[in-house]
């Protein structure tokens, strides 16, 4: 079964190491027998063992380090109609009679696994092509016709860990979440609480309602729906309770000491004090002086207020941070990165365990150049296909945050660097959770000393690294 037919007049198809001949009928017969068969250049195997080897080979076509790594050509008889996951198919040739379009669809589907998931400048995947001969497939429209052949795909660079650069391997804890142990009594130092700024012009304060006729609104019957009625019917105390209850129910609280009802009452008190304080500012005096409009803005920006207060409570009242590790894979490493291919700009890096550093911008390229040349840096890696993520909660939605670089400094400590040209509230929230992640790791111990910082322009990367080299504490959350 694993031997090729030497009568084929195509030399490439007669290379036994690169060509696989599979036949469903023979495979089924082999699995039902125990007779020992000797295959050229292979140890003696029973037919069942041989069938299992064949299945392993088919399942790992093109995968480095696996049984099917070297296979480049497949001669199939009555197989590969489903369950195929090879992503490097470039040509399909039909040498049989096809009795239905469904069968054609299944065979053509063997070449429809994408090789690359890199998005272009427009945010879309680049087109990929497979050449198909002898398969009368007309179920779907296709590109081509009388025009020129499709352009060849852009060259791909192979990205993978390099064994010879294993001294630059970087490991990091694989954390699912950070649990908090809160103080029995919640307190707020109002002098340290950051100011929340609300812009009325970023909020929708009214809407128009009109009947739709022929796909367009009828201006004659258009009416404005204001929010004044909502403001009249909603007391400030109602807003306070909504915010407090959302905060109270937003996260798991197994580590809250004492009665949960007492904690809820404390959260209500803190929210009430925050709303009545000078910690909420509105950009335009017209809205700030009018209590009704101010109430409307608080209703429209309730998620923003909830996020802000909850972040302040977490920072001020956390007694202990406990990282919860992935039990199956508690520590991740650059050595575990799977081989992938990219058409993005990239460059071979000596100080990285990964072969190349892939650039999403010229800014990243400039910072990678500094990290490669600087004596302050021992090793670094771009956070691309590493699986290094930090979960954060923004406006009630759990999201994943991917910092840009992990660095091992000359003093043996670690640093996480984020490059960010334009700041936003969401970016500040990411950094709050990154700061929390760093604190939890340092309190846990066993992973070395970790720092983090944000680069707001390419020229400040050196000063950020020098600050960590001097063993300064982790920076407070940066704001614009």
Image (cartoon, helix red, strand yellow):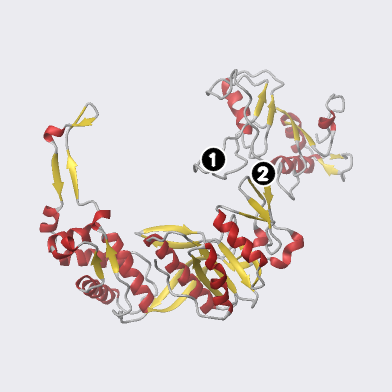
Quadrant, the N terminus: top right
Q: Is residue 108 above or below residue 356?
A: above
Residue 77 percent location from the top left of the image: 72, 27
> Can residue 294 be seen in the rendering of this structure?
no
Q: Give the distance between the C-alpha atoms of the residues marked 1 and 2, in whole angstroms.
A: 14 Å
> Which residue position is annotated with label 1?
125
- Mark 2 secondary-structure assignment: loop
* Precedes in sequence: disc 1 or disc 2: 1
Q: Quadrant of residue 430?
A: bottom left
Residue 318 percent location from the top left of the image: 39, 78
Q: Quadrant of residue 137?
A: top right
Name the residue located 41 percent from the left edge and 77 percent from the top edge: 181
Residue 144 percent location from the top left of the image: 58, 23
Q: Is residue 63 above or below residue 294?
A: above
Q: Of 178 and 225, which appears nearest the observer? A: 225
Tell me, for residue 156, which label it has, or none: 2
Residue 317 percent location from the top left of the image: 36, 78
Quadrant, the C terminus: bottom left
Q: Of 344 and 458, which appears nearest the observer? A: 458
- Mark 1 secondary-structure assignment: loop
Q: Are there few (<14), some (14-19), or many (20+) residues within 10 Å of tag 2?
A: some
Residue that extends furthest to the front in the rendered view of this protein = 459
Q: Is residue 220 above or below residue 465?
A: above
Q: Are there few (<14), some (14-19), or many (20+) residues within 10 Å of tag 1?
A: few
Name the residue located 59 percent from the left edge and 63 percent from the top edge: 329
Tell me, for residue 249, which label it has, or none: none
Viewed as shown, does residue 2 lie left or right of 348? Answer: right
């Amino acid at each position: 079964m694993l031997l090729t037919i030497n009568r084929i007049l195509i030399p490439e198809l007669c290379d036994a190491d690169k060509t696989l001949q599979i036949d469903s009928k023979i495979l089924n017969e082999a699995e039902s027998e125990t007779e020992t068969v000797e295959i050229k250049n292979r140890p003696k195997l029973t037919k069942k063992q041989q069938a299992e080897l064949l299945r392993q080979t088919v399942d790992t076509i093109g995968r480095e380090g696996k049984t099917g790594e070297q296979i480049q050509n497949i001669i199939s008889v009555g197989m590969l109609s489903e369950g195929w996951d090879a992503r490097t198919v470039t040509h399909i040739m039909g040498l049989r009679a096809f009795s239905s379009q469904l069968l054609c669809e299944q065979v053509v589907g063997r070449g429809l696994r994408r090789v690359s998931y890199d998005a272009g400048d427009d945010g879309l995947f680049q087109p990929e092509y497979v050449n198909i001969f002898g398969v009368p497939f007309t179920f779907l429209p296709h590109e081509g016709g009388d025009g020129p052949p499709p352009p060849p795909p852009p060259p791909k660079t192979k990205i993978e860990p390099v064994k010879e650069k294993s001294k630059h391997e970087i490991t990091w804890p694989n954390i699912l979440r950070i649990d908090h142990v809160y103080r029995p009594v919640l307190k707020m130092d109002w002098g340290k609480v950051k100011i929340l700024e609300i812009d009325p012009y970023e909020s929708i304060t009214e809407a128009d309602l009109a009947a739709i006729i022929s796909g367009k609104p009828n201006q004659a019957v258009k009416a404005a729906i204001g929010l004044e009625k909502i403001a009249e019917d909603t007391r400030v105390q109602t807003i306070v309770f909504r915010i407090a209850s959302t905060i109270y129910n937003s996260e798991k609280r197994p580590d809250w000491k004492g009665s949960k009802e007492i904690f809820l009452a404390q959260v209500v008190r803190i929210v009430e004090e925050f709303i009545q304080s000078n910690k909420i500012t509105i950009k335009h005096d017209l809205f700030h002086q009018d209590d009704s409009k101010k109430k409307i803005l608080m209703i429209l920006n309730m998620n923003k207020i909830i996020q802000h207060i909850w972040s302040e409570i977490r920072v001020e009242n956390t007694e202990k941070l406990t990282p919860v590790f992935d039990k199956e894979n508690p520590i991740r490493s650059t050595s575990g990165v799977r081989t992938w291919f990219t058409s993005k700009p990239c460059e071979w890096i000596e100080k990285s365990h990964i072969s190349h550093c892939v650039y999403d911008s010229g800014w990243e390229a400039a910072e990678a150049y500094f990290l490669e040349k600087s004596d302050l840096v021992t090793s670094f890696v771009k956070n691309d296909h590493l699986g290094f993520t930090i979960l954060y909660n923004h406006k009630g939605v759990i999201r994943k945050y991917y910092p840009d670089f992990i660095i091992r400094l000359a003093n043996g400590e670690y640093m996480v660097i984020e490059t960010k040209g334009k700041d936003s509230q969401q970016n500040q929230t990411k950094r709050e959770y990154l700061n929390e992640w760093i604190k939890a790791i340092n309190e846990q111990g066993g992973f070395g000393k970790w720092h983090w910082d944000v680069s707001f322009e390419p020229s400040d990367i050196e000063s950020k690294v020098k600050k960590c080299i001097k063993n300064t504490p982790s920076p407070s959350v940066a704001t614009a």
